[in-house]
Image: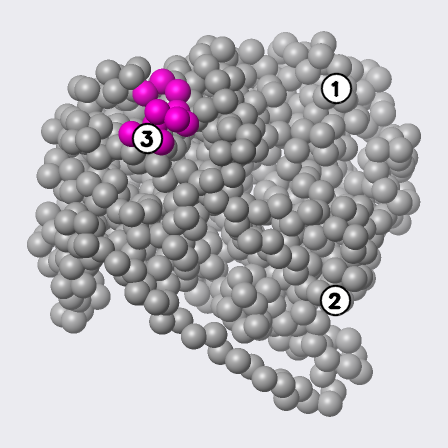
Amino acid sequence: MISKKTEFAKKLIGSKYDTTVSQNIIESILNGSHKLTENQYKKQKCGDRIIPENETVIPSVCFSCHSTCEVLIYKDKNTGEILRIEGDPDSPQTRGMLCPKGLAAKQLVYNPKRLLKPLKRVGKRGEGKWQEISWDEALDTVAEKLKEYKEKYGPQGLAILEGTRRGWSRVYTRFANVLQAPNHGAAGWAQCLWPRLIDCNLTFGGGAQYGEAFDFPNTHCILAWGVNPVTCWGVRAADIMLAKQRGAALIVVDPYFSETAAKADIWLQVRPDTDMALALSFINVIIEEGLTDDDFIEKWTYGYEELKNHVKSYTPEWASKITGVDADLIRKAARVYAKAEAACVIRGLALDQQHDSVQVCRATSILASITGNIGKKGGNVVVSSRGDISQNTHEFIKADFIPEEIRKLRIGYNEFPLLTQELSPVPVAHMPSLWETIISGKPYPIKCATIFGSNAIVSYTNSNKVIEALSRLEFIAVCDIFMTPTAEMADIVLPASTWLERNNVISSFQSSNTYTLIQQKAVTIDEAKNDVDIIIELAKRLGLEEHFWENSEKFYDYLLSPTGYTFKEAAAKRRLYKPLTYESYKEKGFKTPTGKIELYSNLAKAKGCDPLPRYTPSFQSFDSTPELAEEYPLIITTGRHESAFRISENRLQPYLLELVPKPYLYINPKTARRLGIENGRKVKVESTAGYAYAYAYYTEGLREDVVQATSGWWGEYNINKTVPWGKYAEGIGTVCARGYLCRVTPAENLGD
């Protein structure tokens, strides 16, 4: 397998590919002689920047995605116009790096297609007729409608929906909870991050997010599972390469020969949606070969004997038949990870979107636990506390403000307790079930929705169902930066500001293990408003002002209040720092029922879920649904990211569209030729849910039975139209978007 990978890599990246360094690293770990070298990275000293007299510089933080890279915003002193945005080379976090989204953000601010004034729909939905109105009229109308429908149908008759985290998300959740509206939700939560965070709650206890923080600077081995940071976390991609430069081994689990896989010492090309089998076989090898950290297991874990018996049959030979990964390569990867002096796992969206999402995440956490890589220098760690108030707590979002009898009306409450009840980071409704409820009116009517920062028509799976549900609503208010397809269906549209028009306090494990960063507003554009201010103004109109702040500026002061700094004072410092503390569990244990890491989860069992992760076949596959496979003979994974975009965002920015001008379907050339599909040709992708279009992109980096689609494109190219509902991941209700069946044919209308 190694030689085959080497041959393939040479074909893709040239004849200079050399595996000598990789082999030396692997062998040194396996024989116990591995040592790290000093990091060769040298910080570039900028000295005094030479800035033209007509320019001024504002230090800030990009929030185009969750990497939150520190930036320098250059402005014209006379006009106040943003001239350019650059990565800050003095940043200890990002070291001057900035991806295309950040570099092109000026175009986001000044895009002529931006929403700049509140709008009221005139005429029928879909006609595109709008009237500009004042902010007072817009907010009064939204507040009145929320009151009206709450009185008519109860708080459960409201849908309070949002997009991905942008510094205002938990304020919006707080708004939903003090409004006592149980049906709060987002496209991403059961599909992105929540499975990993719920795993952490089950395995390590509330708030101990070991699976999501990694000590790259001190690690000897990185296991990158279902994540390609180049396209989503540029900072983490650089951190991985710096770790490799010091001598850390890199193991990558990915169906596609991604940028990260191309740098791997061991690449495991797993068949989509079979990661559980691979993870269980890793655990089997480590236990059977005595590669566990027995002292750590005895002192700090619960349920090891049950786990040991549970995984006996999950051998590499068994897993190889399911995953397509060679059994000997599985053994080698497991040994390298377990024998490394310190190793960490970085996980991504691909695990979140599998048919057994929470449980496969649990399997990777168990892998880290039985090798003693939890809380350890160079392992998976918890972030430092910098003193600011966290928005990611049930206390902040006022989760208990909704009376119990109303909480139980939350859609999916009984079916998906890990998502809808107290073990969820934010207890929310199960969105596919919510859309079905809006369509059917059962068990009760839902007629009013407010949607902040979410292009729901594109972002949710089974998008045709979402369109149908939105058409059944009697009132919709949308807050966004652009007139998206979802905003087109609204009655009131509120213009939101971009990150360059906002202050913010950014403290997140997804951004940094050791820093809280301060984002500073650089410009004001027309009537666009900060979402925090919009939410606060709505709260005032609904009589909920006691639960909020006077305005967004007071909110940021509140977040920083425990540190002793005001927002202005913290902005002058730019960032708050506190180093990592290793093995902090030795003081207070773990916040689980047993006070230990629960390999066997009592909390999962109490919610009717399997206490140990076990293999179950995919909802759709060649083996589990052979008759369906005859009609749909290819496995498809969706959700691939491009570094130019953030899921459905930035689709109207010309510079970024130059980088990725079309929605591509990655396909093996042999498969494409067999189907009569030329490279670059428009194709039709069909599944049991529906169809969408894309353009064929030849790559030998996929198996011949697998295709991979990029998500986030609008209209007929929205691949989410093909993602079926009906079966969901245990406990959480995740829709499987990484391994269902499809067919691909040349499109009749070739287009451009």
Q: Main secondary structure of the magenta part?
A: helix
Query: Which residue is under mark 1?
Result: 402
In magenta segment, residue 387:
no
How is colour applied across the structure in the image? one colour
- Gap in angstroms between the C-alphas marked 2 and 1: 39 Å
Q: Is 244 displayed left or right of 96 in the figure?
A: left
Residue 300 colored in magenta in the image:
yes
Q: In the rendered image, which quarter contains the C terminus?
A: bottom left
Residue at numbered disc 2 = 572
Q: Residue at x 63, y 72 (%)?
A: 72
Q: Is residue 365 visible?
A: yes
- Please name which of the two marks, 3 or 1, marks the residue nearer to the observer: 3
- Residue 507 at x, y = what percent? 63, 49
Q: Which residue is mark 3?
A: 295
For label 3, count other residues whose C-alpha is less than 10 Å away and answer few (under 14), some (14-19) or many (20+). few
Q: Amino acid at mark 2?
A: Ala
Q: Residue at x 29, y 60 (%)?
A: 36
Q: Nearer the viewer, residue 305 or 520?
A: 305
- Residues 332 and 661: in front is 332
Q: Earlier in the sequence, mark 2 or mark 1?
A: 1
Position of residue 544 measured from the top left corner of the image (x, y, whole percent): 87, 31
Q: Quadrant of residue 522?
A: bottom right
